[in-house]
Amino acid sequence: MGEHHPDVEVLKIVLQVDGKEPEEVTVLGNKDIHFEIPEGSEYFMTIHFTVSNNPLKEFKYKQEVKKAGFVVKSRDVYIGDEFLPREEPYVVEFEKDLTPSGFMFRGNFNCTSTYLANGEFLYAQDWTLTVSKK
């Protein structure tokens, strides 16, 4: 996990939680990615990535959030139809999402972001999330 595919490099993710300053996290080479989001908050993510070598077709993102080994939330995002190789990073903003609220949904979660394109798995990145009391 965390190994990058030769055709795509996710450079950074920007997390924007309503009412807070944007949080920018470098993904490339980072093995300790962590986000904290207050419960019941709307947020959106923006990813910055480059494409090398071969075009990415039907580029997709899948996110799984687990607590005690059980998937408590998953999200599938269709990033786009085709991205051609270029040096300038692509920037894609995901739709808003909402963190759950309540004492059962607070705490630390293990998460995996998986990237797929051209009908194949590209790579996965593990990270952690803390949902805090508002």
Image (cartoon, grey):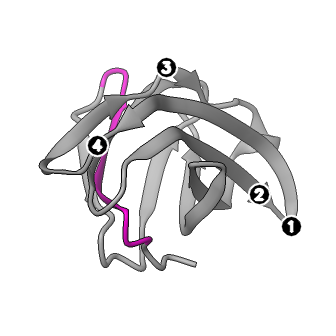
Eye-nearest disc, 2 or 4 = 4
Eye-nearest disc, 1 or 4 = 4
Amino acid type, label 1: Gly
Q: Marks 2 and 4, how far apart in space?
A: 33 Å
Residue where numbered disc 4 is placed: 84
Q: Residue at x 49, y 40 (%)?
A: 57
Amino acid type, label 2: Lys
Q: Position of residue 94 (x, y in %)?
A: 44, 27
Q: Residue at x 70, y 30 (%)?
A: 101
Residue where numbered disc 1 is placed: 69
Residue where numbered disc 2 is placed: 66
Q: Marks 3 and 2, how far apart in space?
A: 20 Å
Q: Position of residue 40 (x, y in %)?
A: 60, 25
Q: Is 56 inside the magenta-drawn segment? A: no
Q: Quadrant of the N terminus?
A: bottom right
Amino acid type, label 3: Lys
What residue span does the magenta drawing correspond to?
5-19
Q: Position of residue 86 (x, y in %)?
A: 16, 49
Chain-order first, disc 1 or disc 3: 1
Tell me: residue 62, above or below residue 112: above
Chain-order first, disc 3 or disc 2: 2
